[in-house]
Image (cartoon, rainbow, N blue to C red):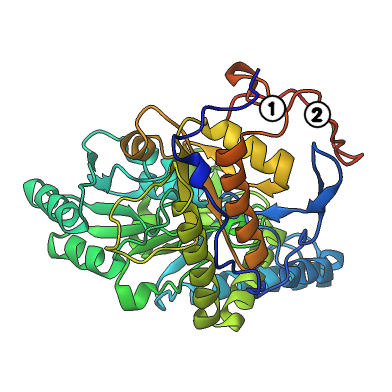
Amino acid sequence: MITTPTPPADAATAVAPADPVTLVAPVAPVLGHGLEAPLVTGGSVAYANLDIAASAPVLSAVHDEVEAFLPWYASVHRGAGYASKVATDAYERSRATIGAFVGARPDDVVVLTAQTTDALNLLARAVPGRAVHLDLEHHANLLPWRRPGDTAVPARSTLAETLAALERELRREPAALLAVTGASNVTGEILPIARLSDLAHRHGARIAVDAAQLAPHRRVDLASTDVDYLALSGHKLYAPYGAGALVGRRDWLDAAPPKLSGGGAVRRVWADDVDWGVAPARHEAGSPNVVGALALAAACRAIEALGAGVVTSHEEALTAALRTGLAAVPGVRLLDLWPGEVDRIGVVSFTVDGVPAELVAQVLSAEHGIGVRDGRFCAHLLLDRLSPGRTAVRASVGLGTAGSEVDRLVRGAAALVQHGPQWRYAGADEGYVPLEDPRVLTPWVQLRAPGPPSC
């Protein structure tokens, strides 16, 4: 049982942030903003969703477009009825919108997938040679590259040293692909995509970018950065309806084995042979996720309409306040790869001396109504480097985040360091959950025993 952790020696000096950002307002409406979260100590507060990096809430504009389309939902591509023609048009227009959002070239192909993981696994089947990647990757861009001959390059203590290590590896042995993240889902640091693209091409390789975290926060343009392939997820991009995309050069995808064998992926089938189609149909067998594609395209349009400057300035203000506020709390340690060397998105991971990350997350939720993530964030190799032997807490902001929510998180962390938990919590074996938890979930949720984390 957990009552009060051992605080740092200077915990008494912990103070709430002097300059809260409570006046920073959301820049786009999302579903769920303003939901009430019950507290173990009694009463409730407006839920502060600071776990955007895991799955972003639905943009209201996306929800509205999906609701308008649903009466027209019908079979795609092979239906003669009017509703089928509407659905097919919506599906293919969505494909074009997604391509335009990421600056696809006229001859690029947009394959609609389930999410980034699905997209990168598809690409791994298509790459005709060795792949090189960094060890800081999310598992979606790490585990597909464990084919024979693929190489993981450890990130170094500086960006310059990391780029030099990548170049040495590309020079050592020819590679077909350099696979990198656009922005770390642990530290929020943005990698220099244009420089990495130039590096790969100088050594005869193509480049693929995992843009799951980058695309919701920064403008991505394949044409201007000369990126060959890009993968993204709707559930990170305020459209959690089960769709993602792989966008890029056609030749490898046309030559690759179909992702699935089934209807829609073929031009003709005989008793002893199959004439497979070309991409994207080649890799979209079965009934496609029309609603997911439509939602992802709607999110692309809504974010594009806001303007890059609005999104960036909003998140920079929130991120700066979050980092400054947490850094002022004694015992809180921010996780960074290359401090001060690169730009960053609104993702901040941290540890608290003497307090398990899982307990920090439970206290923030149960006593302050804040949702954050704890664990290794499907980036085990990077966590092993940044926080050896420990997990961490991750807070992330987005379009629907208000400054008052960031302020509440910083105050909650400071209160935990100063006074410890205000409730009794189970130990590690039970996941540090509140004991005798008085909170009642909404009626349509079945309470289940907590299981092991997925990542």
Q: What is the secondary structure assignment of the residue under circle 1?
A: loop
In depth, the one of 309 and 293 nearer the eye is 309
Q: Which mark is residue 437?
A: 2
Number of disc labels: 2
Q: Position of residue 385 (x, y in %)?
A: 31, 37
Which residue is rendered at x = 15% and y = 60% of the image?
204
Residue 128 lies, with reference to residue 450, above or below; the image says below
Residue 416 lies, with reference to residue 328, above or below; the image says above
In depth, the one of 406 and 126 nearer the eye is 406
Which residue is rendered at x = 66% and y = 47% of the image?
371
- Indicate the quadrant where residue 261 lies: top right
Crowding at label 1, few (<14), some or many (≥20) Cα neighbours within 10 Å?
A: many
Left or right: residue 249 versus residue 346 is left
Q: Are marks 2 and 1 in contact (CB under 8 Å)?
A: yes
Work out which quarter of the rendered image holds the N terminus and state it.
top right
Residue 96 lies, with reference to residue 434, above or below; the image says below
Crowding at label 2, few (<14), some or many (≥20) Cα neighbours within 10 Å?
A: some
- Indicate the quadrant where residue 300 lies: bottom right
Query: The residue under label 1 is which amino acid type?
Result: Val
Left or right: residue 8 versus residue 132 is right
Which residue is rendered at x = 68% and y = 25% of the image?
425
**Residue 277 in sight:** no
Q: Position of residue 345 (x, y in %)?
A: 45, 63
Residue on which disc 1 sits? 433
Residue 73 lies, with reference to residue 391, above or below; the image says below
Q: Position of residue 326 (x, y in %)?
A: 49, 53
Q: Which mark is residue 348?
A: none
Query: The residue under label 2 is which amino acid type?
Result: Asp
**Residue 432 in sight:** yes
Left or right: residue 20 versus residue 138 is right
In depth, the one of 35 and 251 nearer the eye is 35
Which residue is rendered at x = 57% and y = 53% of the image?
410
